[in-house]
Image (spheres, rainbow, N blue to C red):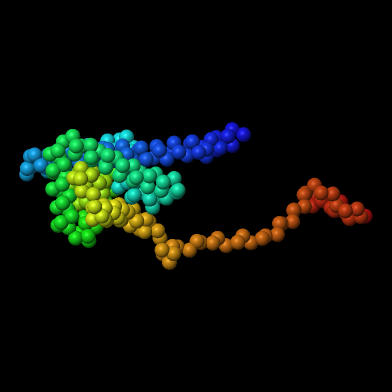
Amino acid sequence: MKERQAKQKKNSPRAIILDLLKKIIDGFLAGALISIGGAVYLACSSEMPPIGKYVGAVFFCTALLCICIKGFSLYTGKIGYVLEKHSKEDISVMLLGLLGNFIGTVACGYLIAAAIPSLKEAAFALCDGKLQSQEWWQTLVRAFFCGILVFLAVDIYRNHKTPLGVVFCIPAFILSGYEHSIADMFYFAASGIASAEALLFIWLVILGNSLGGLMIPALKLIGAKKPASTQEPAVQEPAAQKVAPAEPLASPHTEPPKGVSVSSPDDTTPAE
């Protein structure tokens, strides 16, 4: 009875709405943190050239470290596990998290640009350069390698409980010029560029991040499977032969049948 009531409560419209909101909010918070990291990078790279981009790349790690520690939903950190966990719940967490990432980065992008005009100028120069200097396949390749590094950063933290993956992998993708979809959402929002070209750019980066994040898990999954031809056949043990039970030996104290005389070997008296 209690289980039935708990199930009905879980499937009630109010519970479903609250669950959806929680997933979006987790994504929103992750997007807000990525926006903070992006703002730090813009400030350092624009105000302290040329060393500023190195400092900004290191401080950008603050965003992903906080996301990992607090367990917020970042799409580029979730997509790599979709092969391992692909239930409806896992898919909804990932996709609603992506929606929350978008809302969080766009909202924070506009707010930060309005509050700090110098960052808007830096974001515009960055995003305009991306649109003007990159072919679509270059954007896809840059996003692919970023997806690999972000997956490694999150996976190292998740399995080894160390921030070293974040501290090294995140600056590596930033300084390499790779594209991170959630960070780019913030940069474009802060720049004020809203166009079909910018939207296509973001979708290309999402696709590249997804393919890169899935590469290592997919290859590990393939390597873990043994081909059917290499599997050793099971050894069948020979069936046990049925052995007829041996007849019981006659007891030395068994009495002879009536009418049969049995003489003892020590009896020397002749028979009459």
Farthest residue, direction top? 2
Q: Nearer the viewer, residue 169 or 134?
A: 134
Q: Quadrant of the C terminus?
A: bottom right
Quarter of the rendering containing residue 17: top left
Residue 62 drawn at (x, y percent) = 22, 37
Q: 202 above or below 34?
A: below
Q: 206 above or below 162?
A: below
Quarter of the rendering containing residue 186: top left
Quarter of the rendering containing residue 71: top left
Q: Residue at x 33, y 46 (%)?
A: 98
Left or right: where 44 falls relative to 10: left
Q: Residue at x 19, y 39 (%)?
A: 113
Q: Nearer the viewer, residue 114 or 64?
A: 114
Q: Residue at x 16, y 36 (%)?
A: 116
Residue 177 drawn at (x, y percent) = 16, 51
Q: Is residue 163 visible?
A: no
Left or right: where 13 falls relative to 180: right
- Total labels: the figure holds 0
Q: Is residue 244 visible?
A: yes
Q: Nearer the viewer, residue 143 or 43?
A: 43
Q: Residue at x 34, y 49 (%)?
A: 79
Residue 247 drawn at (x, y percent) = 74, 56
Q: Quadrant of the N terminus?
A: top right
Residue 244 drawn at (x, y percent) = 70, 59
